[in-house]
Image (cartoon, rainbow, N blue to C red):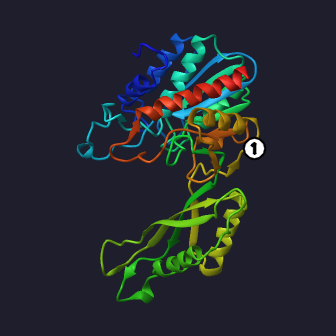
Amino acid sequence: MPNQPSDAAAHLRALIACRSVTPADGGAQAYLADVLSRAGFRVDRLTFSAPGTADIQNLFATIGSGGPHLAFAGHTDVVPPGDEARWSHPPFGGDVAGGMLFGRGAVDMKGGIAAFLAAALALAAEGGPKGTLSLLITGDEEGPAINGTVKLIEWARSNGHRFDAALVGEPTSTTRLGDTIKIGRRGSLSGTLIVNGRQGHVAYPHLADNPTPPLVRILARLVDLELDEGTADFEPSNLEITGIQADSAAFNVIPAAAWARFNIRFNDRWSLTSLNALLRREIAEVAEGNCEIAFQPNPSDWFLTKPGALVTTLSETITAVTGGAPKTSTAGGTSDARYFKDVCPVVEFGLVGDTMHQIDERVPLADLDRLTAIYRGFLDRTFRG
């Protein structure tokens, strides 16, 4: 247990030691609950469930009362380490070498949680916020994201909490700490195209119905789509084929079915409804009535936080600590920030993400300290003016 509340590196080493590969928790949230409760936070440990998914541990911690109410969101779950023998330092060891702290989750995003934890504990030690500070920590961001942040927000609101702003500690910086704040993300829609045919011998095709030619025609139509050229706030939308299969397990057998997976990242020219209609229309023009679409659960819509107090306060704090002004961006994949879009203004800001999900994921100790300083300054500006 760290001796100083501002010791972000000690917090990070303790969190990395927890093998919290989705959906396992490995003790990460118990560690946070202990540290926060001893600092005066009210802590709720919450387990959410859904049919067909693993039970997920979540944490909601709050201190203070009244407004403004700032929420910090993060996730303690991490992706698998891969071949651990390829790591120069154990992925769950939290080793420090050459000014770097190594471990799975060092960047995505136990490092962000550790830095914010250190900043929040320092604020609590100095009398707490003039308002309310909450931490929403899930163990289900890298997985299906069904039993995590979305349900934490629902639970908090059903228990009377109203958020004025939210900060998600994802690794948004690109080349140097503080160069980028994410103010939005494109939406994401995934699905599977399934063409059903009739199995048969390749020497007697008239007795079978090969599903692969119509699937190829459909895919050719979809990959040639130019969805848009981008908008003022977002990159162009794009559709990518991510998997194709039609296997009868024999060279001389026509398969009974063929399928392909796809994902669309879409901007504010589109909605989930309009994309659904587009796909069905395009497929209908080339298919022969034997194609169906199965959309994956939990798609995400695009969101955008317009300029305002939240973006300004965070930008000014980053500039004060680093000496450089951040740019705002909507690039990259989806995150749990999307669940706040209908609740309050939300931004994402955190470490440089150049080693996330990689072998030897690591964070410079100097960046960890600077991120703690930025978070602490942001808290002071938010709650103390």
Is residue 110 in view from this perspective?
no
Given residues 121 and 282, the one toward you in this image is: 121
Is residue 101 in view from this perspective?
yes
Q: Quadrant of the C terminus?
A: top right
Given residues 88 and 335, the one toward you in this image is: 88
| The quarter of the displayed image where residue 87 is located | top left
Q: Amino acid at mark 1?
A: Pro
Residue at 41% x, 87% y is 205
Q: Secondary structure at mark 1?
A: loop
Compared to residue 71, the image places residue 239 above or below, namely: below
Residue 184: percent from left, percent from top: 66, 48
CA neighbours of label 1 inside 10 A, class few (<14), some (14 to 19), many (20+):
few
| The quarter of the displayed image where residue 26 is located | top left
Given residues 198 and 227, the one toward you in this image is: 227
Compared to residue 106, the image places residue 197 above or below, namely: below
Given residues 379 and 264, the one toward you in this image is: 379
Residue ranking furthest to the front:
323
Residue 359: percent from left, percent from top: 33, 46
**Left or right side of 31 for 72:** right
Number of disc labels: 1
Compared to residue 294, the image places residue 297 above or below, namely: above
Q: Quadrant of the N terminus?
A: top left
Instruction: Give the labeled residue for mark 1.
Output: 307
Residue at 63% x, 54% y is 187
Residue ranking furthest to the left:
85
Compared to residue 142, the image places residue 286 above or below, namely: below
Residue at 43% x, 86% y is 207
Residue 161: percent from left, percent from top: 71, 24
Residue 11: percent from left, percent from top: 43, 23
Residue at 50% x, 33% y is 112
